[in-house]
Image: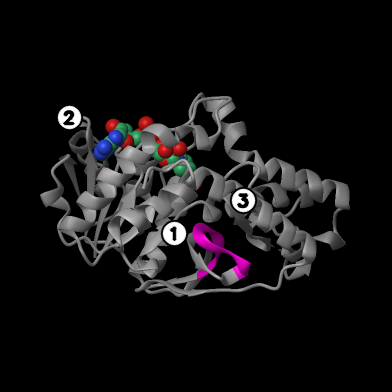
Amino acid sequence: MKVTVVGAGAVGASCAEYIAIKNFASEVVLLDIKEGYAEGKAMDLMQTASLNGFDTRIVGSTNDYSKTADSDICVITSGIPRKPGMTREELIGINAGIVKTVSTSLVKHSPNTILIVVSNPMDTMTYLAHKVTGLPKNRIIGMGGALDSARFKYRLAEALGAPISDVDGMVIGGHSDKGMVPLTRLATRNSVPVSAFISEERLDQVMQDTKVGGATLTGLLGTSAWYAPGAAVSGLVQAIACDQKKIFPCSTLLEGEYGLNDLCIGVPVVLGKNGIEEIVTIDLTDAEKAHMAESAEGVSKTNGLLEL
Ligand code: NAI
């Protein structure tokens, strides 16, 4: 199993590290445009191998795509992150050009690859990758919902005073502060709806805290987060690499599902060796449907800024 990660910055390196530590891939290629940067990160990570007990070989490359040839999975994290006060949508000007070049270069060298798009604005970048590579929709996956759901579970556990492993919940919709749709109705603590434990007001606060989860961290760190994004990507990569058939909310091209068409947005999908094995349809309430429609409108508006 060969995995390429483009962008050896904060998220890319964190993702490469989690993939290596989980020890399911034979090789991880880390590629960056900055001279020597990916080689340096790869060497540093390889020097943790004996300490962390993994055999995955991590190779660095300065923009040499021949090293990425025949990758089973390619992850795109290249692009600028937001600074405090910025929205993800404001990154489109620079990141669209980067994602376009990177995705076509990757597919040229690995025509059978599965692409995971992380760069923001992620739903629009996933749609762009779909348009420019022409890969079948099961092989283009946007990562956002897995991270947002992890943040939702963190906030839920905090509000419930419960261990995180006892809590389950999912965020669908667009990967933006306004676009996220945390499904509080379906969130559970040991299979019991969380509404049995906390008030509607507290649950509403959890939802608001989840939606601004990325912005809160950007305010604290001065740039966007990397540990949870890296871990979320590695979860998707592992589910595909090990054919786990696990369900994650991912951004995928919708063709009528959830009443939506011609956009990529977060919905639950089954991940396995073919990438997206299945889109899972949940019966949403009228309020959730309205929230989802509003979210889709925001994503389509951002997609409209693309020069296709
Ligand atoms: P970073 O600045 O630490 O790293 C980005 C790396 O991309 C840099 O090392 C840069 O040299 C490289 N790069 C730029 N253009 C390139 C090109 N054409 N080819 C190869 N490499 C290139 O940024 P960070 O924090 O790693 O974030 C990366 C992206 O991921 C941002 O767009 C950020 O908004 C996004 N992000 C998305 C998340 C999600 O849930 N979808 C979560 C966190 C970040």
What separation in Å lies between label 3 and label 2 (alpha carbons)? 40 Å
Tell me if residue 155 can be seen: yes
Residue located 87% across and 52% down the image: 200
- Mark 2 vs 1: CB contact within 8 A: no
Q: Secondary structure at mark 3?
A: helix
- Left or right side of 65 for 292: right
Residue located 73% across and 71% down the image: 191
The residue where tag 2 is placed is: 35
**Viewer-side label of 1, 3:** 3
Q: Secondary structure at mark 1?
A: helix
What is the three-letter code of the residue carrying label 2? Glu
The quadrant of the picture showing ligand 1 is top left
Disc marking residue 235: 1
Disc marking residue 297: 3
What is the three-letter code of the residue carrying label 1? Gly
What separation in Å lies between label 1 and label 3 (alpha carbons)? 29 Å
Mark 2 vs ligand 1: CB below 8 Å = no
Magenta span: 258-269
